[in-house]
Amino acid sequence: MNTIMRKSVLSVAGLAFAGGVFAGPIAAHANPVDTKPVAAAVQSTAPKPQGDQSKITLNDEQTANVKAIIAATKKAGLPERAAVISIATSLQESKLENLGHLGDSNDHDSLGLFQQRPSSGWGTPEQITDPAYSTTAFLKGLKQVDGWQDMPLTEAAQTVQVSAYPDAYAQWEQQATDLVGQHWNS
C-alpha cells in the first residue's frame, strides 16, 4: 500500500476511534436511556376471533358465573383458552344466565349455563344448574376433542355441544377473551 493511501486509511480510522471515544461518553450523558420497562406484545397461538363479534353488558349474576367458569377451569388444570371457549359457549347458550326450565320456550330439556340436557346424559337438573358442575361437564367433553387448543373456538364448542347453530359460538370469542383477561388472576 502506498504511503498516501496508508496515511489516509489511518487518519480515517483514527478519527473514527477518537469520535467514538469522545462522542460515546458525551452521547451517553446527553440523552440518558429510559430504564422504564416496555410492554412487549405477546403473540397468542390461539386463532383470531372469526366474523362479527357480539357483546352484552353483564350484571352481577352473569359476572359471578364468569368467575365460576374460570374457577372450574383452573380446578381442572386447564389453560385460559379452555375458559375462553367455555365462556363463549355459555354466552351463546344462555347469555351467562343459569337458566332453569323455560316451559314452552325451552329447547327440549336444556338447562343451566350451557343448556345441557339431562336426557342426553349431562347430569341431573340439579347438577346441570350448578355452574361448577356444568362447567366441569363441558370441560370434560372439551378435553376429549383432539386439538381443541388450536382449533377455531366455534369448532371446539360445537364438537362438545352439538348445536343446531354450529357457527354461533364464534361471535362471543372477543368478549370471552376479554372476560378471561379481566378475571383470570383476580
Image: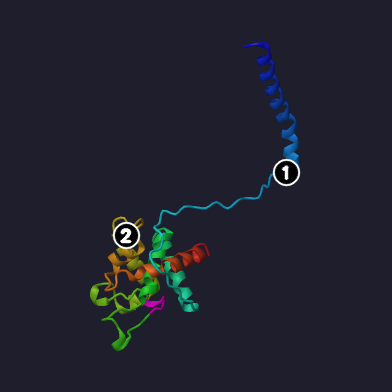
What residue do we see at 68% from left, 19% from top? Answer: 8
Q: Secondary structure at mark 1?
A: loop
Point out the residue furthest to the bottom here.
104
Depth check: give the residue in front, 161 or 72: 161
Residue at figure coordinates x 41%, y 64% from the top left:
84
Establish if 125 lies above or below 4.
below
Q: Quadrant of residue 94?
A: bottom left
Neighbours of disc 2 within 10 Å: few (<14), some (14-19), many (20+): some
Q: Tell me residue 111's x, y (percent).
A: 32, 79
Determine the image quadrant of residue 65.
Answer: bottom left
Q: Quadrant of residue 106?
A: bottom left
Instruction: Judge from the rendering whether residue 186 lies leftward or rightward of residue 34; answer left or right.
Output: left
* Residue at (33, 66) in percent of width and height: 157
Disc sitting over residue 31 in the figure: 1
Q: Position of residue 25 (x, y in %)?
A: 74, 34
Q: Main secondary structure of the magenta part?
A: loop
- Numbered range of the magenta stretch: 94-98
Q: Quadrant of the N terminus?
A: top right
Closer to the chain start, of discs 2 and 1, is 1
Q: Which residue is mark 2?
A: 143
Of the pair 27 and 109, the residue shown nearer to us:
27
Q: Is residue 118 magenta?
A: no
The kind of residue on which mark 2 rests is Lys
Which of labels 2 and 1 is toward the front? 1
Q: Amino acid at mark 1?
A: Asn
Element class at badge 2: helix
Residue 135 locus on image (x, y percent)? 37, 69
Q: Is residue 53 above or below residue 18?
A: below
Residue 96 inside the magenta-drawn segment: yes
